[in-house]
Image (cartoon, helix red, strand yellow):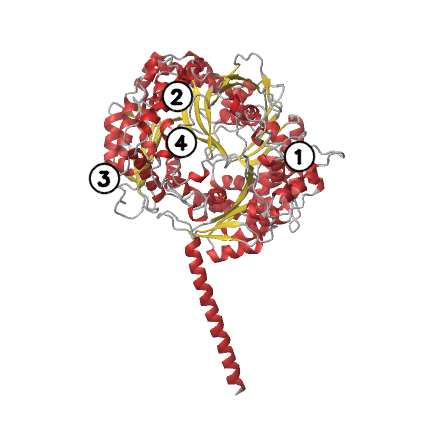
Amino acid sequence: MSTGTRMHRHAHTAIARTLALLTLLLVSVLAQAMEAPRKSPADDNDYRFIELDNGLRAILVSDRQADKAAASLNVAVGSGDDPAGREGMAHFLEHMLFLGTEKYPEPGEYQQFIKSHGGSHNAFTAFQDTNYFFDVEARFLEPALDRFAEQFAAPLFTPELVDRERNAVHSEFSSKQKEDRRRFYSVKKAASNPDHAFSQFAVGNLSTLANTEEQPLRPDLIEFWKTHYSANLMTLAVYGPQSLDDLEQMVRSRFSAIENRNLTAKTFPQPLYQPEQLPAKVTADAIKDVRSLSLSFPIPSQDDKYRTKPASYVANLLGHEGPGSLFDVLKRAGLVESLSAGLGMDTGDNATLEVSMTLTPAGLAQHDEILPLVFDYIDRIREEGISEERFREMQQLAQIDFRFREQGEPVHEATSLSRQLRYYPAEDVLSAPWLLERYAPEQYRAILERLTPDNVMVFVLAPDPALDQPAQTPWYEAEWQRQPLNPTALTEQRLPELAAQLSLPYANPFVPEDLDMVAGATMEQPALLASPGGLDLWFARDTRFDTPKANVFISLRTPAARVSARSSVLTQLLVDAVNTNLNAWAYSARLAGLDYSVYPHLRGITVRVGGYNDKLHTLINRILMQLANPTLTQQRFDIARQNLVDSLQNKAKDRPVEQTSEFVQTALIEGAWPTEDKLEAARQVSLDELKSFSEALLSEVDPVVLAHGNLSRAYTLNLAQQIRAIVLKNSTMAEVERSRVRQLPAEETQVTLDVRHPDTGYTLYMQGENTGFAERARFRLLAQVISSPFYEDIRTTRQLGYIVYATPFEILETPALGFVVQSPKATQAQIDQAVREFSAQFEARLASMDQASLNREKQAVISKLLERDRQLGDISGRYWREIDRAATDFDSRERLAEAVQAVKKDALLETFRQAVLNRERTLRVVTGQSDQNADSALSLLLAQPPVPAS
């Protein structure tokens, strides 16, 4: 009886548990049905929205095929929350959260864990948000989340790290102090409403983050954290291959520990510009040879109109680039180079709609005459542009894009979702960017009513403008001036011949109609099709993503493009003419999901066309016809040549480390001509010379084509006939070898560049002995092992600068390790001494590394090499790179991964000693007062033989 009684009691318990589980399952299914956001039909991921008891909201993404996992946490706090007198505090807090928690007190532990498990991490501070994110090998998501969550639940704000990290923030500020983008942004802040938080300095520096006995920084930091960071202001996205239930368990068990302080996100009801100061023109001084004109119109916030997007409707017309558009008319007149329109800042209370143009020198001289043309075009939109047909076309294109949306990298998906969850309801978090639910003419008109001459702030950026009594922005010392504008003058048309050419866009002829998939299985790799006439034709049918898209690459390799710096310049100018001639006609194709680029390279010119395959052939045909017979005009030639001269001259004003790293590439890559040589050629070439060059360019060609995606073999063969008939009919086939990398001399080569910048730039390039897979694997693994310790020592401990990294500096399969530092306080000698000291100390660390740690680092490298392709373009690009390097077994990454797996510690240590300690075949390029002629060093390097294959 007793046995039976126990069985009876256990049976009752089992039944009760089963009923409870069934009830929970039913509740879970119903909850998921309500909480799963609307997704694309092409999206195989599973989603779940949850809200924790502390108010934190999260979106969970289960991608069963993912080999990488990721997470992103968005806090509804940004630079707009900075206290007066403590500008940069939100940014400083972003830095400090990474540096140790109660559970993981070591300041570099989180970073090292992520790096050693094949991942990356970062964060950014915006005006209203701060976003933290990472990715990692999928199987290490849970321990990564454990470390990540602790940063928000129990950060230490270690006292001795406070002063160190404020120096890092200052270095970040200093590194960009001479950049036009950051300086112009400071002008926009200075010109805004001083009562609006946007007008504040946002980055922070040693002054605003002062740390003295009278004003200690750490208490202010902790107070800011306590009064601004709260679980109810946080939105989280977690992406991984784990089930939704497992992901939910990971999140609830860790992120519930974050305190809910029941805070409210700050609002910004003040207008961005003071109404009494509109209209006005702000002129700012640029360091580089850049010229821009932008119009900023204050409008109401558009956050609550994401389902209809009236600002996007208006901006679509204003920023159109088709025939008769504002951009097309201005570009054909030689006044502008680019034009864009769209929402600027949107605080939830107020927003701006921006129209931005880059100007030619003639456009800068006539920028006052351009303004009435803008308002003329706005009037045309107001009178003729609001139509249901236009809306239906925009809606159709948005629906097609959403239907066939391709997934991005997990970390990008997570970052987007955490931010979108802050602004959109959970059910719309996936679809919100594509929603156009209804035709809303009243909303379009409401936007257009704000785009008036009396409601605009005009910004002009130009080098050395004539400023009568310029002001200077705080911290960046950018000169600027504000002048009132006469609204009546903004409507007085001074370019009537251009105004007469303006017209609104026609119906888009590129809207895809055939969205079916071709028959046949996805091919494992491209096949070389039999194609007479010397054209290498590669074909790969690929329907694995069920998207009716394809990518076509056409490379016209020609010896004429690589003869000299002059021929390189002429190739660039020819490509500019082709792209300019195509733009107005092809803009509609871009809107309809097609994309293209025509670009010069070391071996000639390549055409890349991709997108929905339905009308791909039409676009390809037009591009080929332009290449075969480009329209070359004096006006466009003069503008393009000036643009090229400006860009080459501007290189001398790039960041110091950009200049040092570019010197390495120029000195070592065959056919990469020095800037000075190209600048001299650009100043000398003529239109007649370009015409002659254009006619002769394709006389000798080494053509190769890749057609990949939702295409048939017959389509690809027809494409080959089209290419031969249009661009190769008068060509002789030739072989154009791939460029190689020059081998450095056996000892260390030192070069000092004369760069006008307060920071010191330092690039140490350590070259491998050959281009074999074994040598490449050793350098990849060495970079993986050394990068975090190098960063921790040089940036965090020694505080030498904000821009600090160790990287695999592989160029054209030539292995190398690079150390890069930009310092606002150290000389090049001090940086090099620090690097040498670090290297000497690291030898013992590397020598003592156990096999388990080495295997972990190997796996981190391998996981990056073999990361799953997520989009058709990823695969197309990989195939094209393999074809370019003649690796037509298409297994380079697999072979490199195998080589990484085979690396022995002794071999890795020997590579470290040769490359890093002994500096065999090393190039050190620094900035400062030149004690060595860079030109003579360059001449020496240009004479070196190529790195051997093995």
Which is nearer the N-term, disc 3 or disc 2? 2
Q: Amino acid at mark 4?
A: Ala
Q: Which residue is mark 1?
A: 166
Tag on residue 446? 4
Q: Which residue is mark 2?
A: 375
Asked whether, in this view, residue 218 is left or right of residue 915, the answer is: right
Closer to the camera in the image, 26 or 483: 483
| Mark closer to the observer (2, 4) | 4
Identify which residue is drawn at 51% across, 39% down: 775
Viewer-side label of 4, 1: 4
Dot 1 or dot 3: first in sequence order is: 1
Q: Amino acid at mark 2?
A: Phe
Classify 10 Å Cα crowding around label 4: few (below 14), some (14-19), many (20 and above). some
Image quadrant assignment for residue 620: top left
- Residue 785, position as x, y percentages in the image: 58, 43
Distance Cα–Cα, label 4 vs label 3: 52 Å
**Res 714 label:** 3
